Amino acid sequence: MDTVTTSPRSSSPPILHGSGQFLTFRVGNEEYGVDILRVQGIQVWGGVTPIPNTPQHILGVINLRGTIVPILDLRRRFHLDAQPFGPTTVVVVVKVQVDERSQVFGLVVDAVCDVYRIGEQQINPAPECGRAEAADFVLGLAALDEKMVILLDIDSLVGREARSVRDQQMQ
């Protein structure tokens, strides 16, 4: 059984370097948030062009106004049970920083929820739950309207995949 402790990395709330506004979305039974300044748009799910030899959670790419955008399925990335895409399934298009370069990436989510203004004092550190990888991409937890929102560090979450896709495109 995994133990839950607070890691030294998350012993104090993270310093927010954005607007303090977060777009929230649902993946499975949980609500997640990303800094709204990273969000480039929201697209209706319309399918992708698969790319061979990519990780299972990279569904493929789409052409978004002339830009090739890799699409990551957050259900698969978070090791959740697969569900058929429904009428609320969308792609949240985000800009990530990878090795001092920015790249556009799409995140398939079950539904978009809301936009919240969240101050640093509202953010609790992420508990360490036995998997260091998970703690690397969680900025913290915010209690809002009697629910918990998991705030994501989008650069850490998508960085490895962005490097992989970029390296494949260069081959």
Image (cartoon, rainbow, N blue to C red):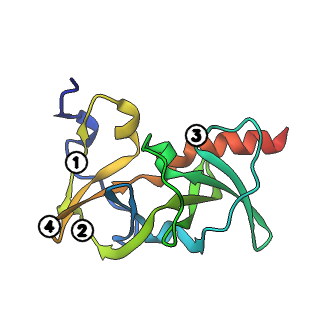
Disc 3 or disc 2, which is closer to the eye?
3
| Labelled disc at residue 160 | 3
Q: Write down the quadrant of residue 108 in the picture.
A: bottom right
Q: Amino acid at mark 3?
A: Arg
Earlier sequence position, callout 3 versus callout 2: 2
Q: What type is the residue that disc 1 sits on?
A: Pro
Q: Residues within 10 Å of mark 4 (few under 14, many from 20)?
A: few
Amino acid of disc 2 = Gly
* Numbered tag placed on residue 125 in the rendering: 1
Q: Residue most toward the top?
A: 1
Label 1–label 4 contact, CB within 8 A = no
Residue sitting nearer the eye, 6 or 8: 6
Badge 3 element = helix
Q: Position of residue 61 (x, y in %)?
A: 72, 56
Q: Rounded to the nearest whole Å, what is the CA distance between mark 1 and mark 4?
A: 18 Å
Res. 146 mark: 4
- Quote the CA–CA distance across marks 4 and 2: 16 Å
| Image-based side of 24 in relation to 9, left or right | right
Label number found at residue 119: 2
